[in-house]
Structure formats: C-alpha cells, structure tokens
Image (cartoon, rainbow, N blue to C red):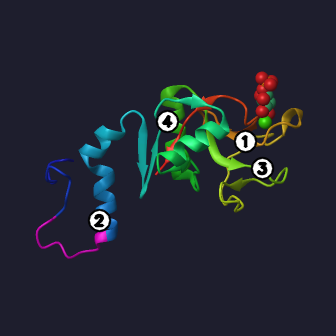
Amino acid sequence: PKGDRGPTGEKGAKGDTGDRGECQQNNLELSPYFLALTFPNGKIVGDKIFMTSGYEGNFDDLKKKCMQAGGQLASPRNNEENAAVQQIVFTHDKSVFLGINDIQTEGKFTYLDGKPIVYSNWQPGEPNNDKGIEDCVQVFSTGKWNDKSCDERLLILCEF
Ligand code: IPD
Ligand code: CA
C-alpha cells in the first residue's frame, strides 16, 4: 500500500534514527520515481541497478559501452539478480551478454575482473563450447544461461 508513504516513499523522515542502510535501500526500490525511471529498461535489486539502453552489439562493444557509462556488463551473483536480468530479457524479447566469460581459460568462467563466478544458472547441457568458439554467456528469456560466441550481437545490459 502506498498510503502510508510520503511522496518519495520515505518512512519517518523526521526524527528517523533507525537503521539507515536498510531503510534507504528499501525506499529506493519502492520509490515511484525510481520505478518510473527504470520502467521498462531497468530493475533495482538491493543496491544494484540493471539497465539496458536498447543498444545491440558484440561482447567487446557492449562491455566498453557499459564501462564508458560508469557501470559494467550485468553480472548476476544470485537468483534475485538473475531474475531481474531475466525480466529485462523477457520484456525486450532479446537475449543479453553477461559480464562473464571463459576467454582466458576454456571452461573456467570468470567475472570481468578475472575472479571465478560464485553463481550460475546454466541451461541443462550448457556450457558446451559449441564448435569450440563459445566463450561468452547469453541469458535466455527463461533466465537460463548458454555459452555463446562473443561475436554474436545481443542486447546491452549494464549494472550500476
Ligand atoms: C546452438 C545450439 C546449442 C547451444 C549453442 C548454440 P545453433 O545454436 O542452441 O545447443 O549450445 O550455444 O549456438 O548454432 O544450433 O543455432
Ligand atoms: Ca552453448
């Protein structure tokens, strides 16, 4: 219910001495201003914002564009974040590249900083490095992951 919130969704702004961290985070997700700003191209999960601009390109291109914007390619680290990615893929009916690949060492998927992934949601049978050329990771509208050639042109999805 929106009734017990102020116009920015704040709870007890005056004299609020409670746990500011969690309180502010919840307010951000509930704020109608943020809901409006992210619709239909973004999702807020905790302190992370996933956002697409609608641009499509290959992995290097999308990686660069996210970095230039001050973010990085979407790198979901749990089910909740992956569900946000899935929703954006579903809404746009276009799959996206994650900020995850095994370019460095075949079969060892890492984030863009080179650290091994802590979460995955592979489609059964994946990753299969089909034709020996699949080092990047795409997300289907089911939320499942598939390794895919980094040369494919997919929808950009950054996280901030
Ligand atoms: C391939 C298949 C395969 C998957 C590959 C895809 P294609 O598509 O869906 O199961 O592992 O990543 O490239 O080449 O048969 O259209
Ligand atoms: Ca594959």
Secondary structure mostly taken by the magenta-highlighted segment of the chain: loop
Establish whether ligand 2 lies closer than 8 Å to the Cβ of label 3. no
Find disc 2 in the rendering and name its residue: 23
Name the amino acid type tagged 3. Answer: Asp
| Residue corresponding to mark 3 | 102
Classify 10 Å Cα crowding around label 4: few (below 14), some (14-19), many (20 and above). many
Disc 1 to disc 3, C-alpha distance: 7 Å
Q: Around disc 3, counting alpha carbons within 10 Å, would you say few (fewer than 14), some (14 to 19), or many (20 or more)?
A: many
Residue farthest along the top direction in this orientation = 93
- Dot 1 surroundings within 10 Å: few (below 14), some, or many (20 or more)? many
Left of 88 or right of it: where is 109?
A: right
Magenta stretch in the rendered image: 12-20
User: In this rendering, does residue 64 appear at all?
Assistant: yes
In the structure shown, which secondary structural element does the residue marked by tag 2 occupy? helix
**What residue would you read off at disc 1?**
136
Q: Residue at x 29, y 63 (%)?
A: 24
| Residue 98 belongs to the span the image colors magenta | no
